[in-house]
Amino acid sequence: MFEVVRNEKLATNLHRLTVAAPRVARARRPGQFVIVRRQEGAERIPLTIADADPQAGTITLIVQAVGASTRGIVSTPAGEFLRDVVGPLGRPTHLERWGCVACVGGGVGTAVLYPIAKALAEIGNKVYAVIGARSAEYVLLARELSAFAEQVFVATEDGSLGRRGLVTVILADMLAGKLPRPDAVYAVGPVLMMAAVADMTRAPEIPTIVSLNPIMIDGTGMCGGCRVMVGGQRKFACVDGPEFDGHQVDFTGLQSRLSMYQQQERMALRASQTCRLEPPAGRNAEEPSG
């Protein structure tokens, strides 16, 4: 059992959890993730470790409640426990001194990006963070990123903070030389966003690393649910990744796989929202059963 030390609501359906997991905190490296279960029999949820404090023995997870299982996780108050926190899993981020690096995060992907960007800065890269969200409410970790990034650029779809539009608007200015031009790009976020970033950097041949966390299920490669074609070869995001060369990823096939279980996810969410059993037809809900 793993105690939730702190549960902070960042925005609607978006929480930052500090969880007591001493062994994970000591072993974790940037880019790695854990598999979390709220309770016995619950769905396995892969979550990137956004930060860790080895001295305190805690890890930080940023969780967006989009389905039944993630809603259960974010509803766990401080002082209560998660059934399983397994990890660290996945290959750590390959860190290199590129020079100027654009770290592009979309939505909750910024939580995945944060430890990567921090590690890149610590080894001497000039990091420029480009983060985006639907609105100002959902912009994550701008203050934390500014502690080590040369500059933090923000884009929101509704224009409530920073540039109006998507993160690709800012990246386009970087590639055009209107802003510092990157020697490498790390992109984490929705699959369509990562695909767009990879398309933009392909022609200028700027190395681009993407994180395929969204497609992971069991975290061990056994289920095969996270298989993806990379450079014409079959890979498994959880054990071969989650990070890959963005120019080699088959994003078309990946997007198709992500939509496979939408119906089941909607059914599970509806079931989790049922707060009581409906009374049999013709019987008043307050009527005793006998």
Image: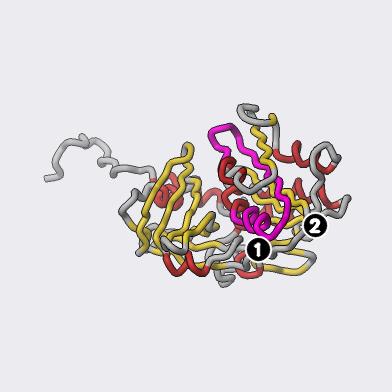
For the N terminus, the image quarter is bottom left
What residue did someone put label 1 on? 93
Question: Which residue sits at x=41%, y=64%?
Answer: 84
Q: Amino acid at mark 1?
A: Thr
Q: Quadrant of the C terminus?
A: top left
Residue drawn where x is 67% and y is 50% of the image: 191
Between 263 and 172, which is closer to the camera in this rendering?
172
**Mark 1 secondary-structure assignment:** loop
Q: CA–CA distance between discs 1 and 2?
A: 14 Å
The residue lying toward the viewer, choosing from 236 and 9, is: 9
Q: Tell me if label 1 and label 2 are in contact, CB under 8 Å.
A: no
Q: Nearer the viewer, residue 5 or 264?
A: 5
Residue 86 x %, y %: 46, 67
Residue 148, position in %: x, y? Answer: 63, 48
Whether residue 46 appears in this view of the structure is: yes
Could you tell me the amino acid type at mark 2? Pro
Q: Residue at 34% of width from left, 50% of height from top?
A: 78
Residue 207 is tagged as 2
Which residues are the magenta region? 115-140
Crowdedness near tag 1: few (<14), some (14–19) or many (≥20) residues, C-alpha within 10 Å:
many
Residue 110 belongs to the span the image colors magenta = no
Ranked by sequence position, the earlier of labels 1 and 2 is 1
Count up the numbered dots. 2
Of helix, strand and loop, which one carries label 2?
loop
What mark, if any, has residue 134 been given in the picture?
Answer: none
